[in-house]
Image: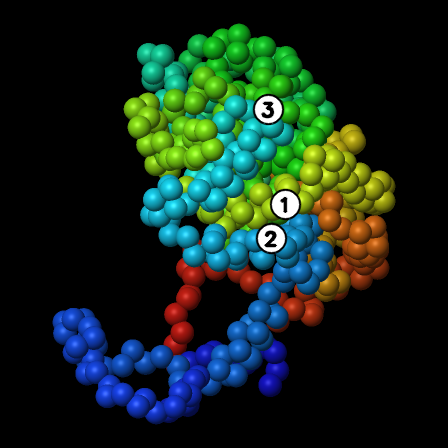
Amino acid sequence: MSAKDFPVIVELSTPGRVGFSFPEPDVPERPIERLLPVDQIREAPPGLPEVSELDVVRHYTRLSHRNFSIDEGFYPLGSCTMKYNPKIHEETAALPGFRRLHPYAPAEEAQGALQLMWELERALAEVSGMDRVTFQPAAGAHGELTGMLMVRAYFAARGEKRTKVIVPDSAHGTNPATAAMVGYQVITVKSDSRGNMDVRALRQAMDESVAAIMLTNPNTLGLFEESIVELEEIVHGRGGQMYLDGANFNAMLGMTRPGDQGFDVMHMNLHKTFTTPHGGGGPGAGAVGIRSHLTPFLPVPVIEKEGDLFRLDDARPQSIGKIRAFYGNFGNLVRAYTYIRTMGADGLRQIAETAVLNANYMLARLRGRFDLPYDRVCKHEFVLAGTRQKKRTGVTTRDMAKRVLDYGFHAPTIYFPLIVEEAIMIEPTETESKRTMDEFVDAMLAIDRETQDNPDLVRSAPHTTPVKRLDEVRAARQPDLRWKTRP
Ligand SMILES: Cc1ncc(COP(=O)(O)O)c(C=O)c1O
């Protein structure tokens, strides 16, 4: 059977086939009416596929091979930090005491879990320079929402009416979306020619109606904001709050602390920096760190330590309330904790050093063959432009990204950030070897040659994947998720 057209699980169904075989029961069977409320018993069976266990295993294993994963190959998706998730995390997250713990277990029976969260909070506070950290948000964008709700509550408590939030034009798209969701008017400030937030433009835009600036650092160009001290003086000088989008904290770990730079609130994507699995909408953890003046507004419950015991504190009248069920994605907190404890302080610093070194190595090899709109030492990622190739033979960045798939890699991020035409955003992460990075760079250089020697080959890529070019807009707007019988 070809990998392209294997049947869906319903088509594999054979009447009477089952995935288990048990000996005949030697006790009388109880009638279904005694097991379930009568009004909830189906009149007819639900029509599930009738398949053997082996059918199921083969079907889903085949399906999984049509996907791409970090365990299979290099995933240089800029802004996403698709780094290796060490397998020991799965072992600790699956320890029965963690896995089987009920979220409603009373605090006295969940001391180990509370201790883990408390210690993880202390560790993240230490590396970020923040005073407290909450783990409730389920992702980075959700962390932004949590952080900005706290900012709003802070000004409300002070009786100040502020209506605006400033974001640079290089901001991650979730930043302006968050500010708007929280009810603020979004003011966009341009980047300067070095890719930093324009200090003069900020000075002009900043006044007492601005609640906060939301800054991504390193920014979406992969560059470190060079004027943080001045930005901080301008914003705090007018009583505003400094929000850091620290989703890409892996570039800074152990090198510098946002709390020391003057940020009041930040989120960190544990599912990026601290190697908990992510992608495909899976569980994330967008921890939010705050300075002490925002502590009263933390979502409840807050984990407190008294003597040797840990407790959940819900009695916080100024809290923004609950942002998610329970305390967040606990399994991912166990993974992040394991990571931090296995890396140690020196290891965390090495993460940043290696992530930055790797990105600059690849940049050095690709510079010259691709346009580079902001030519600076980068942090953990960098942004090239496919403008030269497009001008030469009309081959676009999208075409080249599709061709990357034929070389066995995941494509880099493309057309983001929006301020770079034909953007190609590459993030190697610190977990890749020089050999893998070289193979990817060689592929990019080969594709660049193909854009000149055989542009149609690139224009019609990919050639080796189960599906070719999909109508991405239609797939998002009119998803067809229902199985229908083939005629
Ligand atoms: C800079 C930045 N901010 C925010 C986010 C949003 O995080 P999430 O996808 O977890 O909501 C991301 C995602 O990668 C990001 O790179």
Q: Residue 101, image x and y in percent?
A: 41, 52
Which quarter of the frame holds ligand 1?
A: top right
- Tell me, yes or no, if residue 374 can be seen here: yes
> In the rendered view, does 228 fall on the left or right side of 370?
left
For the residue pair 12 and 71, the one nearer the viewer reads as: 71
Taking the spot 39% from the left edge, 77% from the top edge, the residue there is: 484
For disc 1, the marked residue is: 339
Q: Can you say whether 94 is above or below 355 in the image?
A: below
For disc 3, the marked residue is: 129
Residue furthest out toward the front: 308
Taking the spot 64% from the left edge, 25% from the top edge, the residue there is: 257
For the residue pair 416 and 162, the one nearer the viewer reads as: 162
Is the distance from the Cβ of mark 3 to the nearest ligand 1 atom less than 8 Å? Answer: no
Q: Quadrant of residue 177?
A: top left
Is the distance from the Cβ of mark 2 to the nearest ligand 1 atom less than 8 Å? Answer: no
Amino acid residing under circle 3: Gly
Q: Quadrant of the C terminus?
A: bottom left
For disc 2, the marked residue is: 89
Taking the spot 47% from the left edge, 54% from the top edge, the residue there is: 97
- Tell me, yes or no, if residue 171 can be seen here: no
Q: Can you say whether 360 is above or below 36 in the image?
A: above
Amino acid residing under circle 2: His
For the residue pair 12 and 419, the one nearer the viewer reads as: 12
> In the rendered view, does 189 fall on the left or right side of 433?
left
Measured in 3D between alpha carbons, the distance from the residue under mark 3 to the one under mark 1, in whole angstroms, is 19 Å
Q: Residue 116, image x and y in percent?
A: 51, 41
Density class for disc 3 (Cα within 10 Å; few <14, some 14-19, many ≥20) is many
Question: Which callout, 2 or 3, points to the residue nearer the camera?
Answer: 2
Taking the spot 69% from the left edge, 42% from the top edge, the residue there is: 343
